[in-house]
Image (tube, rainbow, N blue to C red):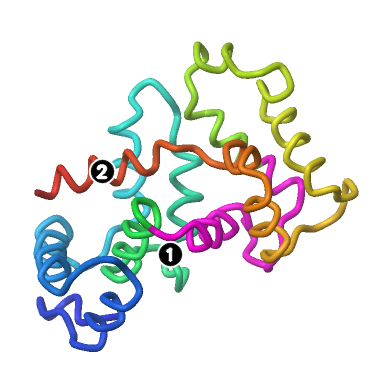
């Protein structure tokens, strides 16, 4: 995945990232240098990623959510994010197209990576999102979504699945695009803010 250790960004990786993200060649080179300065090994560990999240949410418990976000971007499941995975993460959470963002959201909810989502998996992610919402803010949520269980039921009922049913990626993306209210229920908007803070930190 690129020549992380050599300190040079390979032409192949550069072309691939230019094609799949909004970043220019100059931006990618600049990002790469900053990435190596922060992570001399060319990789971010899950622990580093979790600590970045924790520093942005001092009043919450972001560990579980950070682990799920990390998993969704760790494309080759090696327990680290390399430069390519990191840039794709930045692109998707800050400026990706809606469909790309929903593909990422599906990967986030597909905890066991088997290509479908179950109600238990939705509950697991929703629970980790609730850990990020302050108790005060939770009080202001509508009655039918003010607990992880209620929000999970609301999402699941929308897709019209039986209790032990499964949602495919196509159903998930189409369903959310057809109903923006579900998009609000499945996402937590702070990751984008985290990415913006990350950018500031690296500049």
Tell me the SS state at disc 1: loop
Picture quarter with the N terminus: bottom left
Contact? badges 2 and 1 (CB < 8 Å): no
User: Dot 1, how many residues are within 10 Å of its Cα: few (below 14), some (14-19), or many (20+)?
Assistant: some
Question: Disc 2 to disc 1, how far (Cα)?
Answer: 20 Å
Residue drawn at 85 percent across, 55 percent down: 165
In the image: residue 35, left or right of residue 1: left
**Which residue is most to the front?**
178
Picture coordinates of residue 187, whole percent (x, y) = 54, 41
Residue 80 position by quadrant = bottom left
Give the number of the disc on residue 196: 2
- Give the mark, 2 or 1, whose residue is nearer the N terminus: 1
Picture coordinates of residue 13, whole percent (x, y) = 26, 82
Query: As displayed, is residue 20 above or below residue 157?
Result: below
Give the extent of the magenta segment.
96-123
Give the number of the disc on residue 149: none
Quick check: is 121 in the magenta stretch? yes
Picture coordinates of residue 48, whole percent (x, y) = 29, 49
Residue placed most toward the observer, 66 or 152: 152
Give the number of the disc on residue 74: 1
Question: Magenta-highlighted stretch: main secondary structure?
Answer: helix
User: Dot 2, how many residues are within 10 Å of its Cα: few (below 14), some (14-19), or many (20+)?
Assistant: some
Residue placed most toward the observer, 103 or 54: 103
Picture coordinates of residue 93, whole percent (x, y) = 39, 52
Tell me the SS state at disc 2: helix
Query: As displayed, is residue 160 above or below residue 24?
Result: above
Residue drawn at 19 percent across, 76 percent down: 4
In the image: residue 165, left or right of residue 141: right
| Mark toward the viewer: 2 or 1 | 2
Quick check: is 129 in the magenta stretch? no
């Amino acid at each position: 995945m690129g020549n992380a250790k050599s300190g040079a960004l390979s032409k192949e990786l550069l072309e691939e990232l230019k094609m799949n993200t909004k970043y220019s060649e100059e931006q990618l080179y600049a990002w790469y240098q900053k990435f190596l300065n922060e992570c001399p090994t060319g990789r971010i560990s899950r622990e580093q990623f979790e600590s970045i999240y924790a520093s942005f949410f001092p009043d919450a418990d972001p560990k579980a959510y950070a682990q799920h976000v990390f998993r969704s971007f760790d494309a080759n499941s090696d327990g680290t994010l390399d430069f390519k995975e990191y840039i794709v993460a930045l692109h998707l959470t800050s400026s990706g197209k809606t469909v790309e963002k929903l593909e990422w959201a599906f990967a986030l909810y597909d905890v066991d990576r088997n290509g479908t989502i179950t109600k238990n998996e939705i509950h697991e992610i929703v629970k980790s999102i609730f850990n990020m919402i302050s108790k005060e803010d939770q009080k202001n949520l509508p009655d039918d979504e003010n607990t992880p269980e209620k929000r999970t039921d609301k999402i699941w009922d929308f897709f019209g699945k039986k209790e032990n049913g499964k949602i495919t990626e196509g159903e998930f993306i189409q369903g959310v695009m057809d109903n923006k209210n579900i998009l609000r229920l499945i996402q937590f908007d702070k990751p984008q803010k985290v990415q913006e803070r990350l950018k500031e930190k690296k500049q």
